[in-house]
Every structure is written in structure tokens, then in C-alpha cells.
Image: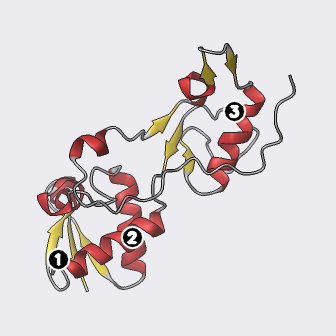
Amino acid sequence: MPQPNITHIDICPPMRTNTTTTKTDTDLKIKTLIPHECPLWNNTSIGRQLSTEGITIVMDDFVRSGHGEWEDDENNDGGDGATRTRCRILWRRPGQLASDVYDWAVKNGYVNSVCTVYELHSGEDVNGMSFQGADEELLRRALGILEDQGKCAMFRGDTSEEDGIKFF
């Protein structure tokens, strides 16, 4: 049976606006996907699975749309795919996370105040926020965007969990 011609698939869920999201909901989000081992492509109840070529088309579109990044593509440029086996899932793009973090800081009175990266990642004030439990590297990229925009300054603490952010 021929594979469908897939030009674009949006497989990211819409952002949830429910602020009662629990930590367990965040823990259930896939952070890294190994595409060729993922059960998403296989429907055993009807005995069908997506071809390797189909998986590649979907994952390339996922990455191209900004919702994924190859972790093992040396140049992260799409290359020939020979080393692309693990994909970091970006539930929110770095720019979107930056906006979410800044909106949270304004809403919660953190402008002209300091908080830690740990508080942004796991603090009580971030329950239900899009960045709660986010990959630390991705969160730092979002903070870097805010720093470039002049909306915050980051400084080093004794440990990475103690690194601070001052919002402007």
C-alpha cells in the first residue's frame, strides 16, 4: 500500500490554559523521542506500521516546524540523517517559553526581583506553567532570549540550581 504524501503534520498538543495542571502531567510529557523505536508509528490491533521513510518525513517536518531538535545530528542542520536517532521534543519553542516566563514574572511580581533557575523549573509558583519541569537547557535558552531583549539578567550561583535571574 503506498504511503500518503505528508507535507505538514502538527503533532504538538495545543497549549493548555488550565492552571491546575499537576507535576505528574509535566512528567508524562515526552522530552526525547527515539523515532524508530516509538510505538506511535505501530498499530498492532490492525497490523500496520508507518514505514521508515514515513517516519523520516514526519520527524523532518517536526524538526522543520521548530517543535523538535535532533540531539545527535552534529550540525543540527538536517544533514543526511545518518546520525539522527534521538529527537528532543520542544513542547514550546524557546521564544514561546521566553514569552511565557516573562509573562509569569510580570504577573507574579518578579520584575525588579530575583529568582533562581530552580524556582522557574520546579518552584511552587510555576505549577501549571508551560515551563514547569522544562528541560533545563531549553529553559536557559529561553532566558538567554529574554536577556538579549533586555528583560532579564542571569548570574551564576554556587550550583546551577542556584543560578539567578533578575527580571526588568
Residue 76 percent location from the top left of the image: 62, 49
Q: Which residue is mark 2?
A: 98
Q: Is residue 129 left or right of residue 36?
A: left
Q: Mark 1 or mark 3: which comes first in sequence?
A: 3
Q: Secondary structure at mark 2?
A: helix
Q: What residue appears at the point 82 percent right and 36 percent down from the top-left corner?
A: 4
Q: Is residue 64 above or below residue 166?
A: above
Q: Secondary structure at mark 3?
A: helix
C-alpha gap between disc 1 and disc 3: 42 Å
Seen from the viewer's position, the closer of residues 128 and 33 is 128
Residue 28 percent location from the top left of the image: 34, 37
Residue 14 percent location from the top left of the image: 47, 57
Q: What residue appears at the point 49 percent right and 43 percent down from the top-left corner?
A: 88
Q: Of the residues shown, which amino acid type is indicated by label 1? A: Asn
Q: Residue furthest front?
A: 46
Local crowd at mark 1 within 10 Å, few (<14), some, or many (≥20)? few
Local crowd at mark 2 within 10 Å, few (<14), some, or many (≥20)? many
Q: Of the residues shown, which amino acid type is indicated by label 2? A: Ala
Seen from the viewer's position, the closer of residues 155 and 90 is 90
**Label of residue 108 in the image:** 1
Could you say which quadrant of the image residue 164 lies in?
bottom left
Q: Is residue 109 left or right of residue 69?
A: left
Q: Mark 3 or mark 2: which comes first in sequence?
A: 3
Q: Is residue 152 above or below residue 2?
A: below
C-alpha gap between disc 2 and disc 1: 15 Å
**Label of residue 55 in the image:** 3
Q: What residue appears at the point 35 percent right and 61 percent down from the top-left corner?
A: 140
Is residue 76 among the parts visible in the rendering? Answer: no
Residue 96 percent location from the top left of the image: 45, 68
Is residue 22 among the parts visible in the rendering? Answer: yes
Give the position of the N terminus as an image quadrant: top right
Q: Of the residues shown, which amino acid type is indicated by label 3? A: Ile
